[in-house]
Image: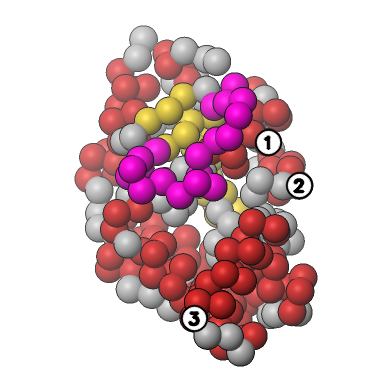
Amino acid sequence: MKPLEQLRETETWVFDLDNTLYPASCGLMADVSTRMTKFVAECLGLDHDRALIEQKRMFREYGTTLRGLMNDHDVDPTHFMNFVHDVDYSLVAPLPKLNNALRALPGRKVIFTNASTAHAEAVLHRLGIADMFEGIFDVAAADYIPKPNPQPYEAIAKLYDIDPAHAVMLEDIGPNLEPAAQMGMSTVWVRYDIMADPYWAIPDGNTDYIHHETEDLADWLETVLAAG
């Protein structure tokens, strides 16, 4: 694990988007999840409760509900993304402290998300930080293979010429950090709303792949900037 003062020398910062760059408490992802359940219900002709069970089954089995719908029901991913991201982005409020920390952070920054580029752009615009990121690597760029499968990690590293030994990945879902650590990246688990963490966001068993942990991303970045 690199000490904080060495992280100041990071060349590439790889940020997850949802519930990482903004807190889960704003409710945006809860609304997206509700839209997913509605999509499953309408697509498969199920009532809400059965659709929710099926949605969670596909998430556990395939890594995302979308991947399950594509594999099991030949669903058009663009149609799915447009439907589930038809939400109120005003729920995401600007975070001046995070904005300032990101602007001061040396190194380039990229987004790595299981969502779509359009969704990421909407969130980044609301946060006022869209201009800080070199690019967005979304689930379409990953050929709809979601984290934590290793393929998208390899793909983003190749696309952006990322040297894992000089990169940091930040993510709210702990297990999604394991492939990054295996590649040689330093990792940061952003634990927003700890008491509300869903079971699948919490690492199970060995957690050696989590190098740093924080409940407040802006505070942690400020600590990195102040180190050394």
Mark 2 falls on what kind of element?
helix
Which amino acid type is shown beneath numbered disc 2? Gln
Q: Indicate which disc residue 48 carries.
A: 3
Q: Residues within 10 Å of mark 3 (few under 14, many from 20)?
A: some
Residue in the image at 39% along x and 70% along y: 31
Q: Indicate which disc residue 179 carries.
A: 1
Residue 76 lies in what quarter of the image? bottom right
Mark closer to the chain start, 3 or 1:
3
Q: Residues within 10 Å of mark 2 (few under 14, many from 20)?
A: some
> In the rendered structure, which segment of residues is drawn in magenta?
191-210
Residue closer to the observer: 7 or 206: 206
Against 42, residue 86 (above or below) is above
Mark 1 falls on what kind of element?
helix
Separation of disc 2 and disc 1 at Cα? 9 Å
Find residue 55 and report its horizontal and vertical position in percent. 58, 69
Separation of disc 3 and disc 1 at Cα? 34 Å
Tell me if I can see residue 133 in this picture: no
* Quarter of the figure with the N terminus: top right
Residue in the image at 46% along x and 24% along y: 212
Find residue 82 and report its horizontal and vertical position in percent. 53, 78
Label 3 with label 1: CB-CB less than 8 Å: no
Tell me if I can see residue 148 in this picture: yes
What type of secondary structure mainly makes up the magenta span? loop
* Quarter of the figure with the C terminus: top left
Separation of disc 2 and disc 3 at Cα? 33 Å
Label 2 with label 1: CB-CB less than 8 Å: no
Residue in the image at 43% along x and 78% along y: 86
**What residue is pinned by disc 2?**
151
Label 2 with label 3: CB-CB less than 8 Å: no
Which amino acid type is shown beneath numbered disc 3? His
Which amino acid type is shown beneath numbered disc 1? Pro
183 left or right, relative to 199: right
